[in-house]
Image: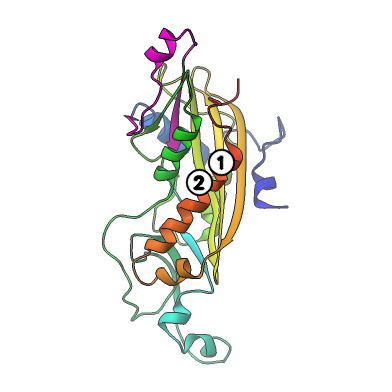
């Protein structure tokens, strides 16, 4: 069974209802930030302009989710410690531990570290989801559709330093399967929550899967789900991970933009 099949809700099947601690924490996080509006810098049709034109306005709030750490294969320790590639296949002592850490440019990843690794990069963590949320809002805008982005990221019930990819996948699966979310009355006509899974690089390949949920804030009910996944080949992106990360960030946003173009109908305003 694929990650996406595991996340798909099973109607009223036992064990699929929103009653876990993780799902409750996610709902509370979404509720706490849903009142934060960030006016988009691009020109957009406002509700008043739509009403003046005779079109019933629809407002959409796009909420970016906390992003999991980037998964890097082969592990970057093979570049930092050239002996590791050979020693790991031999009965020699080469102690390593798994940890989450920040690469240049603030890209959060997880991987193997030795006791003398000095790779921590200062500064805040970088996530592609706020910029992709802005892109989603731009895609959704049309006459009668006003879309804006929440001013904060919805946190998953995991600490950023969590290194185990399986725990991140489980948290994102719980969020995707949850049938409801709580938002204040009047925050928007519709809410689009945007998350991601499968953010990884294998040699020169970069893969990304975007997931989204449409929510009716008046009832709290999830009215639609979607996902899109692609892979691209970009040797410069992988190479930049140990430099400044700029090429990798650019490639990730390019890939994410293509996924949104695939999955979000322009000017749709979401499911009716």
Magenta stretch in the rendered image:
36-65
Residue 41 is a magenta residue: yes
Q: Residue at left 43%, top 21%?
A: 188
Residue nearest the viewer, comparing 212 with 18:
212
Magenta span contains residue 8: no
* Crowd rating for badge 1 (residues with CA inside 10 Å; few <14, some 14–19, many 20+): some
Marks 2/1 in contact by CB < 8 Å: the verdict is yes
Q: Residue 264 appears at what percent x and percent y? A: 57, 35
Tag 1 residue = 261
Against 242, residue 33 (above or below) is: above
Which quadrant of the figure has residue 178? top right
The number of callouts visible is: 2
**Looking at the image, residue 2 lies above or below residue 217:** below
Asked if residue 193 lies left or right of residue 45, the reply is right
Residue 135 in the image: state x and y as whole percent: 45, 40
Q: Nearer the viewer, residue 79 or 243?
A: 243
Up the image or down, 262 lies above or below 266; here it is below
Q: According to the image, label 2 marks what residue?
A: 257
x and y percent of residue 53 in the render? Answer: 44, 10
Corner quadrant of residue 241: bottom left
Q: How far apart are the alpha carbons under marks 2 and 1?
A: 6 Å
Instruction: Name the residue: 53% across, 18% down.
Output: 219
């Amino acid at each position: 069974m694929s990650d996406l099949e595991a996340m798909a809700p099973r109607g009223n099947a036992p064990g699929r209802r929103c009653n876990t601690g993780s799902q409750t924490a996610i709902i509370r996080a979404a509720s706490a930030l849903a009142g934060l509006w960030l006016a988009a810098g691009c020109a957009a049709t406002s509700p008043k302009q739509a009403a003046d034109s005779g079109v019933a306005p629809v407002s959409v709030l796009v909420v970016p989710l906390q992003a999991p750490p980037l998964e890097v294969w082969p592990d970057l320790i093979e570049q930092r410690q050239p002996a590791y590639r050979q020693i790991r296949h031999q009965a020699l002592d080469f102690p390593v531990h798994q940890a989450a850490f920040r690469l240049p440019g603030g890209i959060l990843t997880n991987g193997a570290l030795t006791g003398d690794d000095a790779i921590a990069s200062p500064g805040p963590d970088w996530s592609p989801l706020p910029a992709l949320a802005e892109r989603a809002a731009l895609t959704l805008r049309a006459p009668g559709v006003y879309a804006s982005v929440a001013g904060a990221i919805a946190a998953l019930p995991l600490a950023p330093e969590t290194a185990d990819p399986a725990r991140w996948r489980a948290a994102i699966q719980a969020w995707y399967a949850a049938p409801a979310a709580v938002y204040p009355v009047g925050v928007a006509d519709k809410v689009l929550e945007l998350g991601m899974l499968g953010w990884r690089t294998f040699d020169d390949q970069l893969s990304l899967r975007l997931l989204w949920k449409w929510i009716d804030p008046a009832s709290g009910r999830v009215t639609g789900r979607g996902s899109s996944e692609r892979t691209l080949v970009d040797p410069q992106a992988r190479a930049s991970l140990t430099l400044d990360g700029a090429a990798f960030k650019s490639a990730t946003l390019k890939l994410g933009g293509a996924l949104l173009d695939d999955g979000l109908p322009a000017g749709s305003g979401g499911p009716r």
